[in-house]
């Protein structure tokens, strides 16, 4: 299996051109500087809003890690990740910030990796500057020109395979003055896994299923059931919840919906800068795209987050839970005795 992957990787690099090899072998660390480190959070946590009122030079440090973990109760998988989680950490910066990004590929990795941030204005979104082999570090500096919620992902050939193995995440570029205040913020990202049987519980990546766009699993935050039960999202009656929702893909469009809620505000495709849409039932999130949704929870209970392409939720894992606690609201919802 490993030899097949190596052949695929070599072929993809050849198709991409010799420049990919040059950037891989020529990757180098960022020059010394004194930027402010950015605090990163693993999903579903989100860093606090930025208190600064002016742009700054900040440092984002990421590590690519290949790790075996749980995909479902009866299945394990060797994920390719940023910082060891699927999705990768949530990055929060401010419009006008100058970001020094440094990417290290851990020495025990088998494959080269990179990063393309959709928020970046520059060749390949940074991918050209960060093609790094095991044990290497690369980086680049960029200025955040456009506020919004953006996807980042690995862009090393075969790009689709790197994304399908879990290499994606979200970066928020706050507008001047930030977003409106809410009580709770969470980070949720959908992705697909295309698998075939390996040894024991291990599932291996299936290139054939990925090419045919026939996933075995469609999940939130990298695992079936990872946001259910004891790991469910939490809120209290009367609070406003903001969800930063991404779709790593690599292939499917998400029909994101919270059963039992109406979105008070939606920033479609992560666009910030104009007024949000109001009173939305379901929002489409394309592969490689994102959305910001907000709603006030007024009735206690368990609310299910789903991809409303409903077989994906019921049969393939695209489901999570938000548990709301607090007093009943019979004026809004009351079961009949």
Image (cartoon, rainbow, N blue to C red):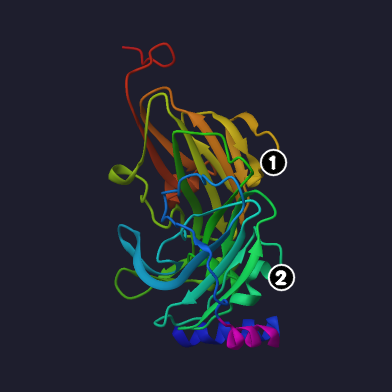
Compare marks 1 and 2 and give the one earlier in the sequence: 2
At x 42%, y 37%, the residue is 304
Q: Secondary structure at mark 2?
A: helix
In the drawing, does residue 160 fall left or right of residue 222? Answer: right
Disc sitting over residue 123 in the figure: 2
Percent across and percent down for residue 113 are: 53, 76
At x 65%, y 76%, the residue is 128
Instruction: Bin the neighbour count of mark 2 within 10 Å (Cα to Cα): few under 14, some 14-19, many 20 and up.
Output: few
Percent across and percent down for residue 124 are: 68, 70
Magenta part of the protein: which range?
18-28
In the drawing, does residue 80 fall left or right of residue 256? Answer: left
> Where 178 falls versus 91 (above or below)?
above
In the drawing, does residue 238 fall left or right of residue 280? Answer: left
Residue 99 in view in this figure: yes
Closest to the observer: 260 or 337?
260
Is 26 a magenta residue?
A: yes
Q: Secondary structure at mark 1?
A: loop
Closest to the observer: 136 or 59?
59
> Where 177 falls versus 210 (above or below)?
above
Percent across and percent down for residue 17 are: 71, 84
Label 1 to label 2, Cα distance in Å?
24 Å
Q: Magenta stretch: dominant SS? A: helix
Q: From the image, which quarter does the N terminus lie in?
A: bottom left
Percent across and percent down for residue 337 are: 31, 12
Is 122 a magenta residue?
A: no
In the drawing, does residue 10 fall left or right of residue 186? Answer: right
Disc sitting over residue 308 in the figure: none
Pointer 1 residue: 273
At x 69%, y 52%, the residue is 146
């Amino acid at each position: 299996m490993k030899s097949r992957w190596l052949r695929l990787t070599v072929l993809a690099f050849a198709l991409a051109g010799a420049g990919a090899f040059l950037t891989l072998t020529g990757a180098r660390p960022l020059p010394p500087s004194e930027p402010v480190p950015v605090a990163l959070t693993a999903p579903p946590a989100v860093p606090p809003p930025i208190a600064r009122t002016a742009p700054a030079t900040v440092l984002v440090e990421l590590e690519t890690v290949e790790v075996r973990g749980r995909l479902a109760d009866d299945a394990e998988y060797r994920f390719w990740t940023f910082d060891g989680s699927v999705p990768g950490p949530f990055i929060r910066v401010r419009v006008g910030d100058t970001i020094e990004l440094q990417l290290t590929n851990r020495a025990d990795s088998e494959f080269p990796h990179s990063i393309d941030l959709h928020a970046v204005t520059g060749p390949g979104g940074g991918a050209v500057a960060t093609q790094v082999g095991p044990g290497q570090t690369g980086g680049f500096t960029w200025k955040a020109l456009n506020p919004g919620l953006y996807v980042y992902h690995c862009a090393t050939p075969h790009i689709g395979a790197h994304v399908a193995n879990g290499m994606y995440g979200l970066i928020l570029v706050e507008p001047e003055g930030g977003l409106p205040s809410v009580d709770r913020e969470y980070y949720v990202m959908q992705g697909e896994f295309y698998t075939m049987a390996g040894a024991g519980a291990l599932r291996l990546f299936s290139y054939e299923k990925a090419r045919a766009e026939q996933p075995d699993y469609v999940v939130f935050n990298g695992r079936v059931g990872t946001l259910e039960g004891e790991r469910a999202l939490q809120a209290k009656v009367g609070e406003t919840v903001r969800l930063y929702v991404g779709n790593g893909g690599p292939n499917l469009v998400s029909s994101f919906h919270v059963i039992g809620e109406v979105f008070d505000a939606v920033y479609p495709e992560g666009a910030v800068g104009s007024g949000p849409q109001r009173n939305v039932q379901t929002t489409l999130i394309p592969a490689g795209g994102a959305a910001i949704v907000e709603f006030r929870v007024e009735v206690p209970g368990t609310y299910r987050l789903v991809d409303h392409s409903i077989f994906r939720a019921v049969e393939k894992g695209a489901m999570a839970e938000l548990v709301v606690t607090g007093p009943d609201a019979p004026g809004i919802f009351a079961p009949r005795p």
